[in-house]
Image (spheres, rainbow, N blue to C red):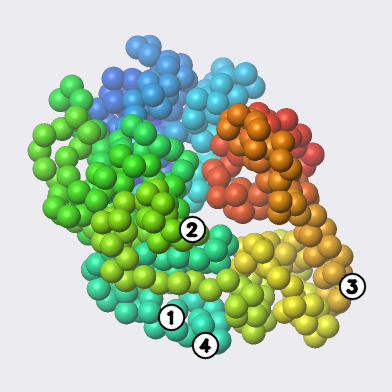
């Protein structure tokens, strides 16, 4: 099976053909376009998972085309810019507009394949058959009664083609359960498409979900891309009222219309919603549509917080150790009994995600010898530099935008310190795409001291 479809847009035929051949050799499906006009048509015909876009072209430069796509309101695959005349300013401008990365000519095959692989892995929503390459069959770790119950419920959900609602605290593993349900769909396969709600809203979200029709051209949305598979809506409580209403109607009728279109399109996929909020409270306060909640919660699953199944911590550590060692960059270190006891008694506000980050940090530090109680307490002590639970009265007197910026800065600073400036870990905890996180940190005045994840 192909690893994904890549559209190569470059007016130089030799370079375009070379890049296509390199990608085909690596089991990607590669298609070419020699101009911006050809790229527009190829985007509609081939529905690529990634676009490699040259900056200098005769009819329209790549930056302008990128800007056009980002402002169209339609769902656009990740775009990586390519240029033989690149400058730092051009790269920054491309990323500011929405590019995922930037490659300079002459192209390095290793750099090209690394960027393509990384960007597709980060964006993997689209046309992912099951789970990630690193975890092809998601495993629900743990021997506790809580996790045994969850495994049974997930297996039951996988056997049915009805909507599923997965609730649990952030970092508890809701996304893993969604992947497990899809991957075990009784051999039916099909793509799994992920949409992170809250990252976009309004018309952009509607176009992303339902697709668009304009000027005789149509672009499919995520619902269509998930046909015969699963559509996972992460943090569904963040969906705005208009999107809730349209999704409710689509599920009730089992069809929808693209934005600007007239022809009905069948839903044709299973919808899985995840949330860390109490949706019953959201319904009671009018922030979430009651009928949509009823349709999504035909099969409700609860993912317990890590503090509710502490006895599974040793098994989880073993799992994360094996993952870290498989990268080839970690040292094997045994967790002493005293260290495990400290971890069992910790509150784990970040749940399993926090435990995984801690294990990775300890194994990637290149230290030797067993991990003892003192080392664990030292790491946890740095993680306890928490933001106060209560906010000063003056906070509530601020305009909403200022209050939000203040909170975002405090939140990101807290996790920035906890992860010791590791942008990869911070992006995972905050559930933000990496380039978006860079822009947000810069906008909030948070300096990047280091990024050890590179």
Q: Residue 145: which numbered mark, if any?
A: 4
Question: How far is disc 4 from disc 3 in space, using C-alphas?
Answer: 31 Å
- Considering only order in the chain, which callout, 3 or 4, is on the residue closer to the N terminus? 4
Question: How far is disc 4 from disc 1 in space, using C-alphas?
Answer: 10 Å
Please tell me how crowded label 2 is: few (under 14), some (14-19), or many (20+) other residues with Cα within 10 Å.
Answer: some
- Considering only order in the chain, which callout, 2 or 4, is on the residue closer to the N terminus? 4
Q: Residue 374: which numbered mark, if any?
A: 3
Which residue lies at the image location 36% right of the left edge and 70% below the top edge? 300
Which residue lies at the image location 76% right of the left edge and 34% below the top edge? 447
Q: What residue would you read off at disc 2?
A: 277
Q: What residue would you read off at disc 1?
A: 151
- Considering only order in the chain, which callout, 3 or 1, is on the residue closer to the N terminus? 1
Residue 418 vertical placement versus 63 (above, below): below
Question: How far is disc 2 from disc 3 in space, using C-alphas?
Answer: 36 Å
Quarter placement of the N terminus: bottom left
For the residue pair 432 and 19, the one nearer the viewer reads as 432
Residue 162, position in %: x, y?
24, 67
Please tell me how crowded label 1 is: few (under 14), some (14-19), or many (20+) other residues with Cα within 10 Å.
Answer: some
Residue extending farthest to the right is: 374
Question: How far is disc 1 from disc 3 in space, using C-alphas?
Answer: 35 Å
Which residue lies at the image location 82% right of the left edge and 58% below the top edge? 382
Question: How far is disc 4 from disc 2 in space, using C-alphas?
Answer: 24 Å
Question: Is residue 134 in view from this perspective?
Answer: yes
Q: Is residue 442 left or right of residue 375?
A: left
- Based on the displayed image, in which of its 4 quarters is residue 283 positioned? bottom left
Mark 4 or mark 2, whichever is nearer to me:
2
For the residue pair 40 and 138, the one nearer the viewer reads as 138
């Amino acid at each position: 099976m192909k690893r994904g479809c890549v559209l190569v847009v470059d007016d130089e035929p030799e370079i375009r053909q070379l890049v296509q051949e390199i990608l085909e050799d690596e089991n990607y499906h590669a298609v070419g376009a020699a101009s911006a006009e050809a790229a527009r048509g190829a985007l509609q015909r081939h529905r690529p998972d990634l676009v490699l876009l040259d900056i200098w072209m005769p009819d329209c430069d790549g930056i302008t085309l990128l800007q056009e796509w980002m402002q169209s309101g339609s769902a656009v695959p990740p775009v990586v810019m390519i240029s033989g005349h690149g400058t730092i300013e051009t790269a920054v401008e491309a990323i500011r507009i929405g590019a995922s990365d930037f490659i300079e000519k002459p192209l390095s095959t290793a750099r090209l394949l690394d960027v393509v692989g990384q960007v597709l892995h980060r964006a993997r929503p689209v046309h992912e058959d099951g789970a990630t390459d690193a975890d092809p069959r998601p495993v629900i770790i743990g021997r506790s009664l809580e996790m045994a119950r969850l495994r049974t419920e997930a297996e039951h959900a996988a056997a049915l083609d009805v909507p599923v609602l997965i609730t649990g605290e952030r970092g508890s593993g809701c996304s893993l359960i969604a992947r497990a349900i899809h991957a075990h769909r009784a051999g039916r396969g099909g793509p799994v498409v992920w949409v992170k709600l809250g990252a976009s809203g309004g018309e952009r979200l509607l176009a992303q979900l339902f697709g668009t029709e304009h000027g005789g051209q149509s672009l499919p949305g995520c619902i269509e891309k998930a046909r015969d598979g699963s559509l996972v809506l992460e943090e569904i409580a963040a969906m705005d009222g208009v999107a809730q209403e349209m999704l409710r109607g689509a599920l009730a009728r089992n069809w929808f219309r693209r934005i600007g279109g007239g022809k009905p399109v069948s839903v044709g996929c299973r919808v899985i919603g995840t949330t860390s909020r109490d949706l019953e409270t959201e319904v009671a306060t009018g922030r979430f549509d009651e009928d949509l909640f009823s349709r999504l919660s035909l099969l409700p699953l609860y993912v317990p917080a890590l503090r509710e199944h502490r006895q599974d911590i040793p098994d989880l550590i073993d799992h994360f150790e094996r993952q870290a060692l498989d990268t080839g960059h970690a040292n094997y270190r045994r967790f002493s009994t005293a260290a495990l006891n400290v971890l069992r008694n910790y509150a784990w506000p970040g749940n399993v995600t926090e435990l995984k980050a801690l294990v990775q940090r300890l194994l990637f530090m290149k230290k030797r010898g067993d991990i003892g109680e003192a080392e664990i307490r030292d790491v946890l002590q740095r993680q306890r530099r928490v933001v106060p639970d209560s906010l000063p009265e003056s906070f509530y007197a601020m305009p909403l935008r200022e209050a939000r910026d203040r909170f975002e800065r405090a939140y990101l600073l807290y996790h920035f310190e906890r992860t010791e400036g590791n942008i990869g870990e911070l992006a995972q905890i905050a559930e933000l795409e990496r380039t978006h996180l860079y822009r947000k940190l810069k906008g909030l005045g948070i300096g990047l001291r280091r990024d050890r994840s590179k």
